[in-house]
Amino acid sequence: MSKKEVFTQAQLDQYYDGMKKEHLGPLWYDLGHMVTKEPVHDVKPYLWKWKTIRAYALTAGDLLEPGKDAERRVVYLQNPSLVERGLIGYGTHTLYAGIQLLMPGESAPSHHHSQSAIRFVIEGEQAYTAVNGEKTYMERGDMILTPAWTWHEHKHEGTEPMFWMDGLDVGLVRTLAASFFEPYEEESYPMEAPENYSTKQFSMGAFKKLNEEKAPGYPSPIFGYKFERVKYLLDQMTEEDNDPFDAYAIEYINPATGGSADSRIGTMMQKLIPGQHTKAHRHVHSAIYHVLEGTGYTVIDGQKFEWEKGDFFILPPWSYHEHVNTGSEDVFLFSFNDKPVMEKLELEFSEEYKENNGQQTVESTFVPNTDV
Ligand code: 1HN
């Protein structure tokens, strides 16, 4: 006789009802919900057209001024699958992306926070981000670090609107209940280092001035990662470097550790040559993609996301994905991700798509909002 049969149905009902009232639960029913066989998540993929984002950001240019009306002028990407749960500013469950606009002459005041941030420049030149008193001038395609808790501010000295993407680990830090923010006591942190110092220090190799104190490890001794160097490296690559899943790809690193440039946010640039179609795989880490150059599509769990220069899309965790270059020019895809966190926590796994020679069947095509 099974032990269960000792009790009448009425006794069992009373037992389970009583347990619920005491805020207790029977693991013998619920283990499978807690410890799932594979990652379970409610992050859906999504895609935003650059034309739409740019128009909304430009209108914000007339609406408010950073430093006066707001801390920053940013239009952020809100994943519709997460807003229902009240998760504001979530692109994925861990990552946030926003598009920041500075008009000529404008500046955004110094502050710091426990979120890590990266910048990726979309349009414009002659604006800088200063990190702990060191100005890094930004040009299209550059990636700039503002590691967690470093003082940072922006100023635009050029003549045309300046757009860049901010990428932060907003969802991760909120989940870990670890958000801290503090404005600097003045508008600007003292400019202590020569302009572009850390970027130049590593551009010809790796040197420091005699007697100069450089803390090893954290944060990265480089703040500005130039696109011209990234492009040079990708263009040097040979067929041997062509990854079946990620094509020609580089990750931005911290030269002092060899690990990810930012300790929590991973950053990658991929190049796909015309006609290139990668194989599908999936991994625990999630990512937000920005199309720097080119035309093509990404298939995410059977759904086709067509993109062109400037667009953004969400790659949820544990979702099969493959990329295709349908144009006649090279594609450059920049993305940032939560891989360093997954790796540090021993949670990063990946799996290749084994059917159909590694390429998914397209079941539907995503239709973006194109009201603007
Ligand atoms: C932030 O500090 C910046 O410094 C931009 O430019 C976007 C989004 C959330 C939290 C902090 C910036 C941000 C942010």
Image (cartoon, rainbow, N blue to C red):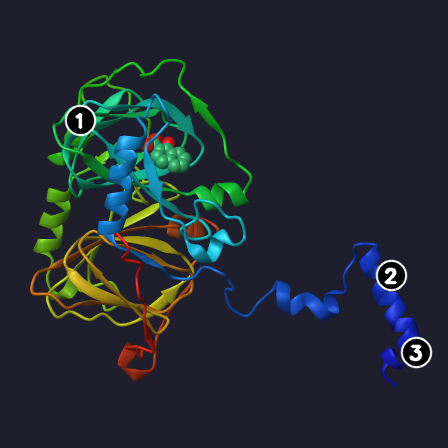
- The residue located at (12%, 28%) in the rendering is 159
Mark 3 closeness class: few <14, some 14–19, many ≥20 residues within 10 Å: few
- The residue located at (24%, 44%) in the rendering is 55
Query: Image height check: is 8 above or below 117?
Result: below
Disc 2 or 1, which lies upstream in sequence? 2
Q: Nearer the viewer, mark 3 or mark 1?
A: 1
Question: Disc 2 marks which residue?
Answer: 18
Q: Which mark is residue 8?
A: 3
Instruction: Name the amino acid type tagged 1.
Output: Pro
Instruction: Name the amino acid type tagged 2.
Output: Gly
Q: Looking at this view, is 175 or 284 the one in front?
A: 175
- The answer to whether residue 238 shows anywhere in this view is yes
The quarter of the displayed image where residue 162 is located: top left
Separation of residues labelled 2 and 1 (CA atoms): 66 Å
Q: Pinpoint residue 51: horizontal percent, then vertical percent.
A: 22, 50
Disc 3 or 2, which lies upstream in sequence? 3
Query: Image height check: is 71 above or below 81?
Result: above
- Return the residue found at the far bottom: 1
At numbered mark 3, what does the secondary structure look like: helix, strand or loop?
Answer: loop
Instruction: Name the amino acid type tagged 3.
Output: Thr
On the rendering, which quadrant does ligand 1 occupy?
top left
Evaluate if marks 3 and 2 touch, with contact meaning CB atoms under 8 Å apart. no
The quarter of the displayed image where residue 187 is located: top left
Q: Looking at this view, is 331 or 187 the one in front?
A: 187
Q: Pinpoint residue 29: horizontal percent, then vertical percent.
A: 72, 70
Mark 2 closeness class: few <14, some 14–19, many ≥20 residues within 10 Å: few
Question: Disc 1 marks which residue?
Answer: 104
Disc 3 or 1, which lies upstream in sequence? 3
